[in-house]
Image (cartoon, rainbow, N blue to C red):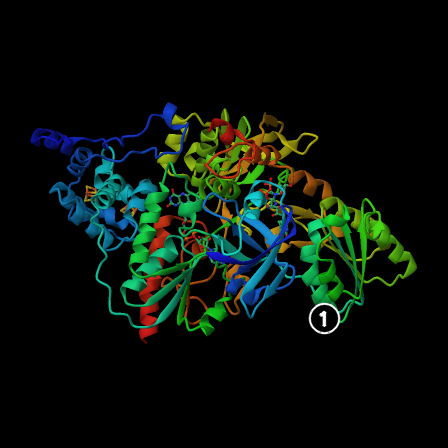
Amino acid sequence: MYQILKKQELIPDLMILFEVQAPLVAASCQAGQFVMLRKDEIGERIPLTIADFDRGHGTITVIFQVVGKSTQLMAKLNEGDYFLDFAGPLGQPSHIEKFGRVIMVGGGVGVAPIHPIAREMKLAGNEVISILGARSHDLLILENEMEKVSSEIIVTTDDGSYGRQGFVTEVLKELMTERGGIDLVVAIGPMVMMQAVCDVTKEVGIPTVVSLNPIMVDGTGMCGACRVEVGTDTKFACVDGPEFDGHKVNWTLARQRALMFTEEEKRAMFEHHNEGSGCRCGCHQQKN
Amino acid sequence: MRMPSAEELKQATKSTCKRPMPSQNPEERVHHFTEVALGYTEEDALLEAARCLGCKTEECRQGCPVDIAIPDFIKKIKTGNYVGAALKIKETSSLPAICGRVCPQESQCEKYCVRGKKGEPVGIGRLERFVADYERAQGTVKVPEIAPANGIKVAIIGSGPAGLTCAGELAKMGYSVTIFEALHVAGGVLMYGIPEFRLPKDIVQADIGYVRQLGVDIQTNVVIGRTMKVDELMEQGYQAIFIGTGAGLPNFMGIPGENLNGVYSANEFLTRVNLMKGYRFPEYLTPIRIGKRVAILGAGNVAMDSARCAKRLGAEEVYIVYRRSEKEMPARAEEVEHAHEEGILFHLLTQPVEIKGDQENWVKELVCVKCELGEPDASGRRSPINIAGSEYSLPVETVVVAIGQSPNPLIQTTTQGLKTGRHGTIDANSDGQTSRIGIFAGGDIVTGAATVILAMGAGRKAAAAMDKYLKS
Ligand SMILES: Cc1cc2nc3c(=O)[nH]c(=O)nc-3n(C[C@H](O)[C@H](O)[C@H](O)COP(=O)(O)OP(=O)(O)OC[C@H]3O[C@@H](n4cnc5c(N)ncnc54)[C@H](O)[C@@H]3O)c2cc1C
Ligand SMILES: Cc1cc2nc3c(=O)[nH]c(=O)nc-3n(C[C@H](O)[C@H](O)[C@H](O)COP(=O)(O)OP(=O)(O)OC[C@H]3O[C@@H](n4cnc5c(N)ncnc54)[C@H](O)[C@@H]3O)c2cc1C
Ligand code: SF4
Ligand code: SF4
Ligand code: FES
């Protein structure tokens, strides 16, 4: 059992931060790796990137967005509650070295996994320019934290409610023309965003790393659910990744595979099962 | 409970047929996941035991990888001493309830039984299952005598049959044993692969409970190679290590279309269904999606299990697609028979060459070509040759690739100086000793995908060798 020591609703009911007691994971994890966790006996194994860690206290921080049944149930946990399972660290760590000028692009909840990588990049002596994107101001997370680990940050919102109005790719293009000398781009966020970033950098050949989040079951290389095509190879994202050369990723396939269980995910949201397990359709109240 | 009369017992000794296994009827059982074979009643067991000649030469024993004293345990059944029979088996096998259910008896113990020369062999596996179930039902499972604790720490990596057996043996000798398991439950393939209707999970859990009772500490969610490395275990004072990480890496065919939506590896399919209880979705949250028509590629136990799961999940037509003939199928005879009974359709001498999808990337059809058998290859099996112009396509919505598993590479790539074989296996001698002193290995990780009883036997042998190593 893995206790939740701290809960913070970065955005109420939508973006949740948990600090979880997991000393073995904390002792060996590195930026870019993830954990597989399971809330309880009926739960799915859910992959979440390690957003931060504290080796001294033996804790791991995860930040997740509520998107479906499992994340909805997880969001109800409170400080003092437990995850039944919490395994990791999994996947390959980010490749950190002194590249020179590195642009970190984080979109939505993707800012969370970007944060520890930005920190390591800065420590390795890179100039780190971070571009954070959100749909609107109230959906922006970790701005202060990113400020601390970046040489410079630029925020964009789709609706212009904060920072610059527009998409992260526009800022990226500007930086490319106005400053140049970009040695590496790291982009994490929704698949459309990562793909758009890759389209921009591919033309001019700026190496671009993305972190893929395909559907996973075990996270240890045993099932192949997470397979993605990179160049001419099929890779298992959980052991070969999750970070890959964005210019080589087959995005069409990756996007389509993410839809494999859409119907079932909807069913899980709307069919009620055990008592008290969070059915929102109101049917329980009606019966009583 | 009805007991056989003396006359019936006398008749039974002459029977050339195995007493049939009481089973759920196929029409009904394809709708749920409860166990298909119901097990012998006491009457069945006595009548079947009567068929055993108690041969002095003990031919049957040569076929059992762990050398169970078969005539002796059957003799105890004849006298009604079922618990005694169970204890006899447990002298050399720690998982009789499991092996009695899943051993490929026809190619092991029963293959050598002298009664098999004229008619059917004695149903050794069925009798083994009977006594193990009897013992459990009586609640008579006792923890054997455990040697006084010697304070020596040993680590076991992986909790499949190899790891569990090795751990249990070492615990009995007084070692302080910790198992590290990557998944959230112990049991390996017994839990994530073999389905409930063939091997009920509470039976596996009962055996794991027994290993715990022996004093073994099982730590789940620890992925060795990631959470901790083998060398770190050494530094933490584990004086010997056993690696039983199995063959869990799914093989794909390498044909076009294998990454389409609707194509699963057998491991993914079975893990969703069994380990994550996807057959009870949405009560359990892990989804599984199944089409009306499902093609399973391969014809081993893994393929039969996948096919029969697909049927139970509601598929209307399930095909086994296999490039050789029925005779070469690697699955246990009983699984093939059960699959036939459940209406699984066999496309034999058929080689899949491509999976085609629709515009949204979902599987639409499997393109196959007919084969004929040529000369025997190195393995002695006749190799299939594609027949030119025989291509046809099979409309399906789901494809499960069940053509085998390779050893899990995580330990090999994160441990210095561990010699490996050509197919990614860890090199070990017959005692399980690897190229690194103090590190032992056994089961599928050494042999490649094999059987439960062989993994168990390897775990046992390694435990003895580890004891010798630690005492020297
Ligand atoms: C390596 C990795 C790291 C991730 N890190 C984060 C993170 O830090 N923060 C965060 O908010 N999300 C992260 N995700 C995504 C997160 O795992 C999914 O959002 C979550 O599993 C959705 O579960 P659900 O039941 O609530 O939603 P569902 O209704 O089941 O699905 C909603 C969406 O999530 C995807 N999804 C469903 N099941 C899985 C699964 N088992 N594995 C992966 N994706 C799935 C579906 O494709 C769908 O688009 C990561 C995914 C991966 C693979
Ligand atoms: C679907 C299916 C059906 C089968 N049917 C039969 C049958 O009917 N009869 C029969 O005799 N055999 C059958 N087999 C084969 C049999 O199950 C295996 O030969 C046997 O389980 C091998 O045992 P093992 O202990 O070597 O490995 P496994 O049972 O594979 O166990 C290995 C364990 O190690 C864990 N592990 C792996 N890597 C790590 C790591 N780095 N750190 C920590 N833990 C790790 C795994 O999670 C797993 O729990 C079947 C196999 C499958 C897949
Ligand atoms: S363990 Fe397997 S091979 Fe040995 S006697 Fe039992 S069923 Fe036969
Ligand atoms: S060979 Fe057959 S008949 Fe003879 S002892 Fe063994 S099981 Fe009994
Ligand atoms: S999640 Fe199963 S192999 Fe990657």
- Identify the residue at the far left of this view: B6
Q: Is residue B374 left or right of residue A186?
A: left
Position in image of residue B188 (x %, y %): 42, 50
Q: Residues within 10 Å of mark 1 (few under 14, many from 20)?
A: some
Quarter of the figure that contains the N terminus of chain B: top left
Which residue lies at the image location 31% right of the left edge and 46% below the top edge? Answer: B99
- Amino acid type at mark 1: Leu
Q: Which quadrant would the C terminus of chain B be assigned to in this image?
A: bottom left
Position of residue A238 measured from the top left corner of the image (x, y, whole percent): 60, 52
Which residue is drawn at the image coordinates 24% and 45% (left, top)? B136
Q: Position of residue B423 (x, y in %)?
A: 52, 55
Q: Is residue B176 visible?
A: yes
Q: Which residue is rendered at x = 64% and y = 37% of the image?
A: A259
Q: Quadrant of residue A122?
A: bottom right
As rendered, which of B152 and A163 lies closer to the eye? A163
| Residue A252 placement, left or right of B155 | right
Q: Is residue B434 above or below residue B328?
A: below
Residue at image mark 1: A123
Q: Residue furthest bottom?
A: B472
Q: Which chain is indicated by disc 1?
A: A
